[in-house]
């Protein structure tokens, strides 16, 4: 899983007008939600936050927030929601969810097929039935993606099923092992 460090500061001003002032000062307001605790209001440097969000967009990532002015200091979070201005494409607000790195969670992990199947070269058609898998494990043990080489697939053959995929030891696949991921027809 991808890990990113982003510096932040505790936000002491609240409300619509104050949030606008923050944005004019090139700061982005955000909130960290945590189980059983009160939400923590933060502010980020607009440029640094935007670059990091672009890097992790659409991927599973653990973000380590180095928070200035917080008694805890560093918090491990995941991006829960990003609010963007639809016209100007700027980030208006971000919601983070604090996670425990020692507890297991479910994650959707992309399945990336590489190579050209032999059966496709012989006139067959590749039928991909799974784009992602559901994996469960500690956040840092989850891979960014599962890469599968399909060059050995032949026309009318068995195909690649979930049981054929290589996943890390500490991670459990929640998809059915006999589910077919790709086949040449």
Image (cartoon, rainbow, N blue to C red):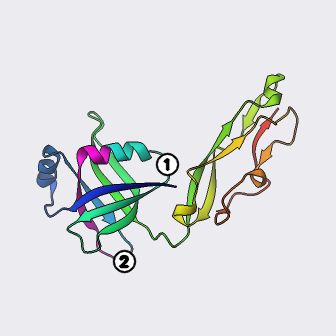
Q: Is residue 184 magenta?
A: no
Residue at the image position 80 percent from the left and 54 percent from the top: 178
Badge 1: residue crowd in 10 Å (few <14, some 14–19, many ≥20): some
Residue at the image position 13 percent from the left and 44 percent from the top: 24
* Residue 69 placement, left or right of 105: left
**Can residue 177 be spotted in the picture?**
yes
| 94 vs 150: above or below | below
- Which of the 4 image quarters holds residue 72? bottom left
- Which quadrant of the figure contains the C terminus? top right
Q: Is residue 37 magenta?
A: yes
**Can residue 129 be spotted in the picture?**
no
Judging by the rendered image, the residue that carries numbered circle 1 is: 59
Q: What is the x, y in percent for residue 57?
A: 43, 45
Q: CA distance from mark 1 to mark 2?
A: 27 Å
Judging by the rendered image, the residue that carries numbered circle 2 is: 36
Disc on res. 172? none
Badge 2: residue crowd in 10 Å (few <14, some 14–19, many ≥20): few
Residue at the image position 36 percent from the left and 77 percent from the top: 36
Residue stretch rendered in magenta on the structure: 36-50
- Which of the 4 image quarters holds residue 149? top right
Q: How many marks do you count on the picture?
A: 2
Q: Secondary structure at mark 2?
A: loop
* Residue 58 placement, left or right of 54: right
Q: What is the x, y in percent for residue 29?
A: 23, 54
Q: Secondary structure at mark 1?
A: loop
Residue at the image position 74 percent from the left and 52 percent from the top: 162
| 143 vs 184: above or below | below
Mark 1 / mark 2, whichever is N-terminal: 2
Q: Nearer the viewer, residue 92 or 56?
A: 56
* Residue 178 placement, left or right of 147: right
Q: What is the x, y in percent for residue 176?
A: 74, 58
Q: What is the x, y in percent for residue 40?
A: 26, 67
């Amino acid at each position: 899983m991808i890990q990113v460090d982003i510096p932040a500061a505790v936000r002491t001003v609240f409300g619509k007008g104050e949030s606008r002032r923050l944005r004019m000062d090139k700061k982005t307001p955000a909130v960290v939600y945590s189980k059983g605790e009160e939400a923590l209001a933060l502010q980020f440097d607009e440029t640094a936050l935007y670059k990091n969000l672009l890097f992790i967009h659409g991927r599973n990532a653990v973000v380590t927030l180095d928070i200035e002015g917080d008694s805890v200091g560093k918090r491990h979070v995941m991006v829960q929601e990003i609010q963007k201005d639809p016209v100007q494409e700027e980030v208006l607000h971000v919601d983070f969810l604090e996670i425990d790195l020692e507890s297991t969670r479910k994650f959707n992990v992309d399945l990336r097929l590489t190579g050209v199947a032999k059966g496709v070269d012989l006139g067959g058609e590749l039928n991909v039935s799974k784009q992602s898998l559901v994996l469960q494990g500690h956040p840092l043990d989850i891979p960014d993606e599962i890469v599968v080489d399909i060059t050995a697939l032949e026309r009318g053959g068995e195909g690649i099923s979930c049981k054929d995929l290589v996943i890390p030891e500490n991670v459990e696949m929640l998809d059915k092992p006999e589910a077919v991921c790709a086949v040449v027809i």
